[in-house]
Image (cartoon, grey):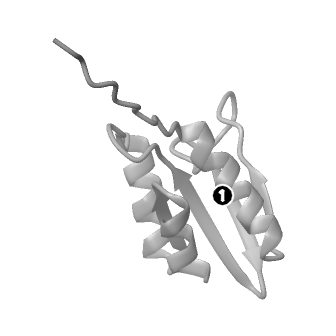
Amino acid sequence: MKRKLRLKIKITENDIKLQVKQYLSLRGWFHFHLMAGMGAYSGSPDRIAVKDGRVLFLEIKKPVGWKHSDPQKRFQKDIREHDGEYYLIKSLDDLIKIIG
């Protein structure tokens, strides 16, 4: 009996983070990564991007099996209540739909 070989490509959260970083730079956005840790606002997103007066709060997740923590949900709610732009990004396509 022959077994079929299947190639599974696993896209990680770090893969998406790198793609987002590169695309934002390519499109001329000022952006930076936020480090979680002591003194950080609980639930802060992975990246903030700014261009032409627009400020994006970007939480980057892997395409499948991701979890949005309760602090992240609260942060999202706080930003949106103040008319801010908070997005969950699970692929480069998600970002392209947001900024073009």
Q: Nearer the viewer, residue 81 or 89?
A: 89
Q: Quick check: 14 above or below 32?
A: above
Give the left or right position of residue 27, taking residue 77 as reference. Answer: right
Give the left or right position of residue 72, taking residue 100 as reference. Answer: left
Task: Name the residue located 27 percent from the left edge and 25 percent from the top edge.
Answer: 4
Q: Nearer the viewer, residue 88 or 41?
A: 88
Give the left or right position of residue 48, taking residue 61 as reference. Answer: right
Q: How many marks?
A: 1
Residue situated furthest front in the rendering: 1
Task: Name the residue located 81 percent from the left edge and 70 percent from the top edge.
Answer: 26
What is the x, y in percent for residue 93? 50, 68
Task: Name the residue located 61 percent from the left edge and 80 percent from the top edge.
Answer: 99
SS for tag 1?
Answer: helix
Label 1 Cα neighbours within 10 Å, binned few <14 / some 14-19 / many ≥20: many
Residue situated furthest top in the rendering: 1
What is the x, y in percent for residue 32? 78, 55
Residue that numbered label 1 is attached to: 20
Quadrant in the picture for residue 6:
top left
Q: Nearer the viewer, residue 31 or 17?
A: 17
Residue situated furthest bottom in the rendering: 52
Three-letter residue code for mark 1: Val
What is the x, y in percent for residue 8? 40, 33
What is the x, y in percent for residue 97? 50, 78
Q: Quick check: 1 above or below 70?
A: above
* The N terminus: image quadrant: top left
Task: Name the residue located 61 percent from the left edge and 83 percent from the top edge.
Answer: 100
